[in-house]
Amino acid sequence: MTTEHLIDDRPLVPLRALANKVPEVTVYFWIIKVLTTGMGETASDLLARLLGPVPAVALGGLALVASLAVQFAVRRYIAWVYWTAVVMVSVFGTMAADVLHVGLGVPYTVSTPLFLTALTAVFALWYAVERTLSIHGVRTRRRETFYWAAVLATFALGTAAGDLTATVGFGYLGSVVLFAAAICVPALAHRFAGLNAVTAFWTAYVITRPLGASLADWMALGHARGGLGLGLGPVTLAWTTAIVGFVGYLAVSRRDTAGGRAI
């Protein structure tokens, strides 16, 4: 599913000719998206362990606000600005889901449908106001606000859903396999069954969160919890390094912009 498949609400208008503040949807988009989900999962847990839950949430919230302020301030898509905001949404989205479960005792069976309802409400309001959910229509402040609200809701939903499957019998590795299979469904449905491109995109976008988070948890957590026992710090560092590498490549090559060579 690439950018040329995501058509805006204006028929017959090529989106590559329109200004937009999100990247082209290429294979790099999906790779970095999965990496940010895993890094956000382990970084959130690491910060909570080092600083305590309350200071970690406060720090994560401040970093999220700062990164989004920069993203809203720039007038065009800039790779490092955009992906920094996504990383901070990932970290804070994880914290939001964990606060409900650990801090308030809300079970994942409740928080998962709760976040799903929140995401549905964001999409419903976005569509009611703008008549489109296409990410390639994000060229006004209002649409950008809806976009980031949806992104935050998808991260919180994906975190809760991933933790739910991991605790109901699938385990972390089983969850990786489950969500790896699940993410193929919207892509295949779009290609062979006529599923709307925007619906397929957002479905896959949600699934990347529990996929990446489950994979990172499996790598970081101890053998007693079904993981490889590599540790939160090393896994966070490794995934952060990979993100920096891919984003740096895109910043130089511009393969994720309308003027680059989308895959």
Image: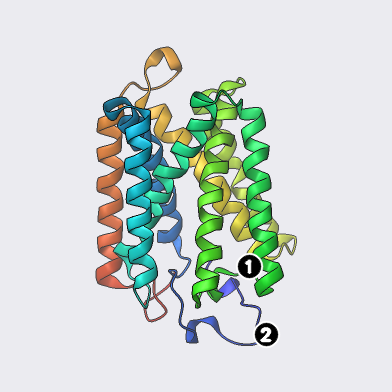
Q: Quadrant of the N terminus?
A: bottom right
Side (left or right) of 22 relative to 127: left
Q: Residues within 10 Å of mark 1 (few under 14, many from 20)?
A: many
CA separation, marks 1 and 2? Answer: 14 Å
Residue 133: numbered disc: 1
Q: Position of residue 103 (x, y in %)?
A: 49, 25
Q: Is residue 1 visible?
A: no
Give the residue type at disc 1.
Leu
Q: Is residue 235 visible?
A: yes
Q: Name the residue nearer the viewer: 160 or 213.
A: 160
Give the residue type at disc 2.
Pro
Q: Residue at x 65, y 74 (%)?
A: 130
Q: Could you tell me which secondary element the residue under label 1 belongs to? A: loop
Which residue is disc 2 drawn over?
Answer: 11
**Mark 1 vs mark 2: which is more N-terminal?**
2
Q: Name the residue nearer the viewer: 47 or 8.
A: 47
Q: Residue at x 51, y 77 (%)?
A: 140
Q: Could you tell me which secondary element the residue under label 2 belongs to? A: loop
Q: Residues within 10 Å of mark 2 (few under 14, many from 20)?
A: few
Q: Quadrant of the C terminus?
A: bottom left
Above-or-below relation of 50 to 255: above
Report if the CB atoms under discs 1 and 2 are less than 8 Å apart: no
Above-or-below relation of 122 to 49: below
Q: Position of residue 184 (x, y in %)?
A: 60, 49
Q: Position of residue 127 (x, y in %)?
A: 68, 68
